[in-house]
Image (tube, grey):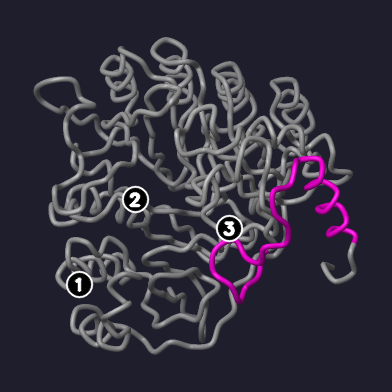
Amino acid sequence: MATFRPPQRCQPAGHPLNERPMSTALRPSACPGLLRIVQALDGGICRIKLNGGSITADQADAVADAAERFASGAIEATNRANLQIRGIGEQSAALIDSLLTAGLGPQTAAGDDVRNLMLSPSAGIDRQLQFDTRPLAEQILATLQTHPRFHELSAKFAVQLDGGEALAMLEHPHDLWLSAFERDGEMLLAFGLAGCPTDRAVGAVTVENGHALVVAVLELFLELARPEQTRMRHLLDEWPMLAFLEQLRERVAIKAAIARQRTPLADALHIGVHAQNADDRVYVGAVPALGRLDPAMLRGAARLAREFGDGSLRFTPWQSLLLPNVKATDAAQVLENLGQLHWLTDAGEPLSRLIACTGSSGCGKGLADTKHDARRLATLLPQAQSVHLSGCPRSCAAAHRTPATLLAVSPGHYDLYFRDATLPGFGTLHARNLTIEAAAILLDARSRSPLDA
């Protein structure tokens, strides 16, 4: 079975590691990384990028220990299947060093920002997968970190590799996406730029040319883009897609795009017990309320991974956790134990479907305490709904459009939007300046409306 190898520990020289600039001056970033602590109202933030969302039980213990010893103990699962530690104070250098010792750092110091490759959380084990993306992903990640030119990319520049899994986040826009499909008995990778795998592909390559395609697209982007053009969409605003593809064909063999449809097969596959592609194995999914967990929750999950799984944990773009390769006969026990650790394990629990950013309790841009308000909302909703509470228009907690968004306008008050595919941003503004109680009434009414079926 293919697995990700933990990256080698990088050895930054000189002074405290977090003071070492990780972004080039060409496209500097204010985003946190493992080697760059970014300050917030509640202290420093350290973001730990996980290869394919995967982490070993020992590494999970190291994250829990670091959060407990050198920070406030607050750990967050992010919408890119990473982890971050909040509330870091004066011991930031010790925290970083402990994470590097655990093998959680990049292969090169300058490579930390650019290891942005999203896979399905069930890569290699999903019952519907077309092919196991992990070996190709490992090759791409190594190149992203070691190719010096790629360190000029923005820390937000991101690639998605989709193996056709049933459990897949298909709504996060990526600068480059690749999606597996079969044609005439041959496995191919459709690809597109500045979009999602549900979009129409602009071309296709063989699986063997998948790595070459990623390298060619990124090199061509860096040759054509001005420094202020940090994302592929910025370049395509002024550079015609056909012109970009014409130059791309000079670097890698591209097949013509074909009509294909990529849709998820079911909802809420990231929570509960679900069969794998091995007959007697399942994965068990659980959600930390609003993406926030503590060291005890993470250590407990690591213990369950060792006892009942394969010793690994996988984090997801739904800010949740999978424990893979659990025997079907052990699934009920694992689910019960996760519940005892305060993980949410039932998709019917309203809190399991809510998203909320840090809010005003930890972010200077937040206009309301979104996490507090989300917990209040969960008690008022008769049934689970996918709702996003955002403290400001930046929408940090959700990279995709949720069916409903509550955008804070002042403490305890929100504007309510409903998703509309024809409109940018959050969608259609439905009501202004609502209390959480008023929002709950409108959300419940919307869920019962036949127009929303």
Give the side of residue 72 with respect to residue 22, left or right: right
Type of amino acid at the residue the image marks with label 2: Glu
Q: Is residue 266 magenta?
A: no
Give the side of residue 287 with respect to residue 70, left or right: right
Q: Where does residue 162 sit, x and y in percent of width and height?
A: 49, 63
User: Sequence-wise, which precedes: disc 3 or disc 1?
Assistant: 3
Q: Which numbered mark, 3 or 2, is in the foreground of this view? A: 3
- Which quarter of the figure is the C terminus placed in? bottom right
Q: Quadrant of residue 20?
A: top left
Kindly report the distance in space between the C-alpha atoms of the residues bearing marks 3 and 2. 18 Å
In the figure, 265 relative to 82: above or below?
A: below
Q: Which residue is mark 2?
A: 138
Q: Where does residue 159 sit, x and y in percent of width and height?
A: 38, 60
Residue contact between numbered discs 3 and 1, judged by CB atoms under 8 Å: no
**Dot 1, crowdedness within 10 Å: few (<14), some or many (≥20)?**
some
Q: Secondary structure at mark 2?
A: helix
Q: Nearer the viewer, residue 420 or 84?
A: 420
Magenta stretch, residue numbers: 419-448
In the figure, 282 relative to 332: above or below?
A: below
At x 42% / y 15%, what residue is drawn?
Answer: 71
User: Sequence-wise, which precedes: disc 3 or disc 2?
Assistant: 2
Q: Nearer the viewer, residue 259 or 368?
A: 368
Q: What mark, if any, has residue 168 been given in the picture?
A: 3
